[in-house]
Image (cartoon, helix red, strand yellow):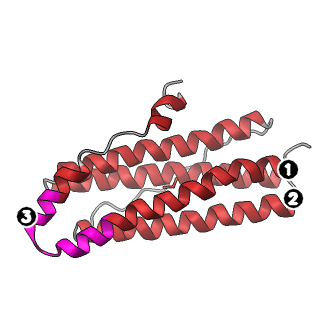
């Protein structure tokens, strides 16, 4: 069954939002660099790569179904946050919004009886559980740390150990 124009349009919009997510986290990486928290910045740079991988999954899927990939303008992300906690709470709210959008896409695939798109989206349904969890974990730790500079610096060195996931590394999406 051919993919519908409506589904292609919505998938292209999501591709755009994934690139926006990448952009948002790169902006957060810049913010963390500016306040001397290079571990937090590294964590966000890894997240930027993850989001680009998400975008490429939509790109490749649309193309594989014979749809036309369209690239829309990318909104400029915010630049400053009040604190690391403020940034991570902003990011967590953003991820919850992404989860809603993925759910809406799933609903559309069901309504259109587009089983292939439904199937592809299941990866994102699972991924969003992990995404919310990983941001939430940092939010909770930052709340525990409060204004304790030593705790924040300890967290900074912990978060700096994050590496690009094996799937992202091997997906080839960013190397083509
Ligand atoms: Fe692409 Fe962070 O969800």
Q: CA distance from mark 2 to mark 1?
A: 8 Å
Query: How many other residues sit within 10 Å of disc 2, few (<14), some (14-19) or many (≥20)?
Result: some
Q: Secondary structure at mark 2?
A: loop
Ligand 1 within 8 Å, label 2 CB: no
Please name the residue shown 88% across and 57% down the image.
113
Residue shown at 48% from the left, 47% from the top: 51
Residue depicted at x 39% and y 63%: 135
**In the image: residue 57, left or right of residue 118:** left
Name the mark nearer the viewer: 3 or 2.
Answer: 3
Report x, y in % for residue 60. 66, 36
Q: Are marks 2 and 1 in contact (CB under 8 Å)?
A: yes
Task: List the residue tagged with mark 1.
Answer: 4
Question: Mark 3: few, some, or many residues within 10 Å (few <14, many ≥20)?
Answer: few
Q: Nearer the viewer, residue 124 or 32?
A: 124
Q: Which residues are magenta?
A: 138-154
Q: CA distance from mark 3 to mark 2?
A: 53 Å
Across and down, in percent, residue 81 comes to: 27, 67
């Amino acid at each position: 069954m051919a993919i519908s124009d409506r589904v292609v349009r919505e998938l292209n919009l999501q591709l755009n939002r994934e690139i926006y997510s990448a952009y948002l986290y790169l902006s957060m990486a810049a913010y963390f660099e500016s306040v001397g928290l290079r571990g937090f910045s590294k964590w966000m740079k890894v997240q930027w790569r993850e989001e680009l991988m998400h975008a490429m999954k939509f790109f490749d899927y649309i193309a594989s179904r014979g749809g036309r990939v369209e690239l829309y303008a990318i909104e400029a992300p915010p630049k400053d946050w009040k604190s690391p906690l403020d940034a991570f709470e902003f990011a967590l709210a953003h991820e919850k919004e992404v989860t809603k959008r993925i759910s809406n896409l799933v609903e559309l695939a069901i309504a259109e009886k587009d089983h292939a798109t439904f199937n592809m989206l299941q990866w994102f349904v699972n991924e969003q559980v992990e995404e919310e969890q990983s941001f939430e974990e940092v939010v909770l730790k930052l709340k525990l740390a409060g204004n304790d500079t030593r705790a924040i610096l300890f967290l900074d060195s912990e978060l700096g150990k994050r590496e690009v996931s094996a799937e992202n590394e091997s997906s080839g999406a960013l190397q083509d």
